[in-house]
Amino acid sequence: MGLLRYTLWRFAQAIPVLVGIVTITFFLANQIPGDPVEIMLGPTPAQEQVEAIRARYGLDRPLYERYLTYLAGVATGDLGQSIYFDRPVAEMILLRLPVTLLLMVSAFAFAIVTAIPLGVLSAKRRNEPADHVSRVVSLVGVSTPSFWIGLVLIIVFAFYLGWFPARGLVLPWADPADVRGAATRLAVLRQSAHHLFLPMIALGTLQMAQIARIERSSMVDSLQGEYVTLARAYGVPESTIVRKHAFQVAQLPVITIVGLGLSTALGGAVLTETVFEIQGMGRLIITAINNQDYELIMGTTLVFGFVYVVGVIVTDVAYSYLDPRVTYGDD
Amino acid sequence: MSRPRTTRLSRRQILAGGAASTSLLLAGCTGGGESGSGSTDGSSDTTDDGDSSGPDPTLYVAQVKGPIDMDPVVINDVPSGQIAGQIFDGLYEYGEDVRIQPKIAADMPTVERDGTRYIVPLREGATFHNGDPVTADDVVHTMTAPVDEQTANASEVNMIDTAEVVDETTVQFDLKYPYGAFTTAMVRSVVNASVRREDPEAYNQEPIGSGPFRLVEWEPENYATVERVDDYWDTAGQPAVAGIEFDPIEEQTTRVTELETGNVDIIETIPPQLYETVESNQSARVTESPGVGYYYLAFNCANGPTSDPRVREAVDYCFSMDQAIENFVEPSGVRQYSPYPASISAEWEFPVEEWSAIPHDQDIDAATSLFEEAGVSTDYEWRIIVPPDDMREQIGITIGDGLQNAGFENVEVQRLDWGTFIQTYQSDEGPNSEDAYNMYTLGWSGSPDPDAFAYYLLSQQTNGVTNGTFHGYDEASAMLTQARESADYETRRERYIDATTQLLEARVHLPAYNLNNSYGVNDAVDGFSAHPIATEVQVATDHTTVSVSR
């Protein structure tokens, strides 16, 4: 099976998974006690008003009918209407998704850029002080919740030192005319980076620690391989052995952990966005749940599920692409 | 499968991208005082004041939450109302307190037909931001559209039977029943009917008002930016700031930090534990005003032991509400002894002192003997439900502790999500059982009229809807209805006093507290003060002009 066919086949396999996500989310959300219209209105004596609003959003129809309507809508790209915002769910998601993606991409970039050298260094200097430091950093990173890291960063770097803003995000593609104090594109980018720095570290620390741990153990294995011994016997310089022989082979488990780290990062994004007051998907899903906004809960969950499924597929495809021993489903 | 040839290149590209990102981030790290955006995600920074719209600076306001809507016909939340208040004018507006004064109206309304007809004269010369004059048709549409379209705030004007344009400068409202609080219902933002009718959804995105500021841009649940209307029709209310940027900062510590660092000029709602921080700040101050709200403990008067007034009095003896408020609410709120906020009590000259003598101090012996007299076994399983709010939960826990001190071991204080809470205490099938709750803590905010509190929370007409007590005090309930349907001030006042005294003595409710509307204000801001109405962030009105000097 070729790469393209394999990729398409994996995406086709994802369809029932997404239908499953929609189905489970739909019925779970509708089992939550309470009523979104009553939450929206609060206690109100106007019962006819409650009924009119329920009818407007189709909440007066049987559950199965609403489910089928929703499925049909999703199939055509219509994610429904948010009760809380009174706007199309897709519109709200399009507004918020880029913010979360920016945060996640930055966090992963930070994690990869810091974790790989850390892991390699740790493996190369195994059981030396540098290794111990690296392992302690990784252990602390894995064990510390992102929201706590975020709060500490805010207290130290925003409150006491005043080096970084404590909240918000400037999008790098924002029009300079709309960004206060930024007359040029470069100024917008600088402000964006300035705002992104703390949330990026808060969200990326866990990924960094996980990747560093895997990188280290994978590099340790790799450096003990027979091909490395052979290379050393041939007198190949150590730096070349690490860079060319050991490193590449050691990256396969790292790629897996990066792909699977997407789900953790999505969960972490909810907390990070809350701590840093960033209006992304994480805040949106919290708003949806707090207000029992069924359509918004389903829409945001579906997008989270989709991002995760895509992450897993890309990991699988990359894995097969990089490792000749892995086939595209051929026997 | 062939071995990929591009692996190394891809890795390099990734590394190059990473390096570029890192460089960019490091560049950002050195960016020091530059931060903030007025448009992308609500962050703000006043250290570099890039105002370009005139010599007056922009005012930066941190709200607790961001706006949801911009069309006054559909707005049903405080943050949206605070912003819409800058963009729109109403027929009437609040003064420095809860008394109202004409704005687009030329004078106070003429009331006829035993309080069922209100005739309002309009001022000439009021215009919308697009140049359209504010007409009688705009006023009629403003007052009738919520019910016609069944919007979430329709109950605020659903007493209107018909609204008519009498002539170009006169509007007449006929009510379904006499409604003494109708004047406050007319403090609604007047919308541009012709523009709104064309496309209501677009109007919610890009509203056209007649207020001192026009909307520049906004994002739902996020920021909003308004700019001064230079040719504002009401010269008495001309703003002294170039514009206002509203940003939501939900995390209270962050909000206070942003005030301390000077990134915002005004922050909304100071939590009790941070009052001292703001007050001790050299360059900021606190302004506060008791809000128009009421927080209380209510009993299930229909079922279970609390249907006996002796048991309700025993519960009152179990704990000290004064102490609980001091511990958990002050200085963010004040003790309240009746359903009416201080501003209403003052305006209506209610006997607050008399009512404040009704609740008991803690006396466990007195409580125990009353429980015994009423035959309540110490095995009884008490259930107190509270909404997802820390202060109200603490009141519930305090009562639970008091009951335990009185010998009851089975006391459950259950914090419920809003949806579950409302579903539990509302009922259209008669009184709730004692299994649902014996007591609940709740709060209410309304318009500055006694009816907004007494009728909704204590009348039998609202049993199972906004009144979960299901009390049997028919006479008191009838008086509340009479007060509601009378246009005579003295009659209303007497009815409210008599009914309220009776219900407080019967301990249908134990009034608890009212929250202050509090703001932290940078000293660079002049002229701003908190208002009793939560939606009133008064920056440019006929009596208030807020300015900023940097």
Image (cartoon, rainbow, N blue to C red):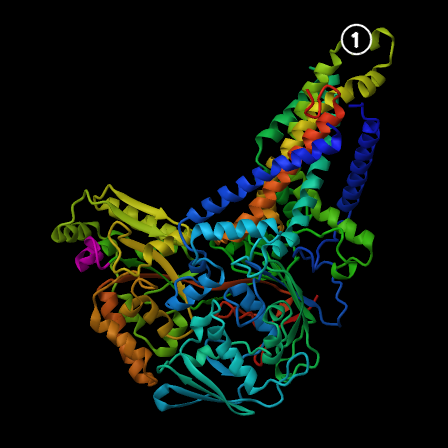
Q: Is residue A114 left or right of residue B464?
A: right
Magenta part, dominant SS: helix
Residue at the extreme bottom of the image, as rendered: B167
> In the structure shown, which secondary structural element does the residue marked by tag 1 occupy?
helix
Closer to the camera in the image, B438 or B375: B438
Closer to the camera in the image, B272 or B373: B373
Q: Does the image show residue B381? A: yes
B544 falls in the magenta region:
no
Q: Position of residue A231 (x, y in %)?
A: 83, 10
Closer to the camera in the image, B198 or B166: B198
The chain that hosts pointer 1 is A
Is residue A189 positioned above or below A106 on the image?
below
Is residue B220 positioned above or below A168 on the image?
below
The quarter holding residue A49 reads bottom left
Q: Amino acid at mark 1?
A: Thr
Q: Does the image show residue B331? A: no
Q: Is residue B194 left or right of residue B152?
A: right
Residue sitting at x 33%, y 86%: B488
Residue sitting at x 72%, y 53%: B35
Q: Is residue A240 left or right of residue B362?
A: right
Pointer 1 residue: A229
Please give the range of residues in magenta.
B301-313
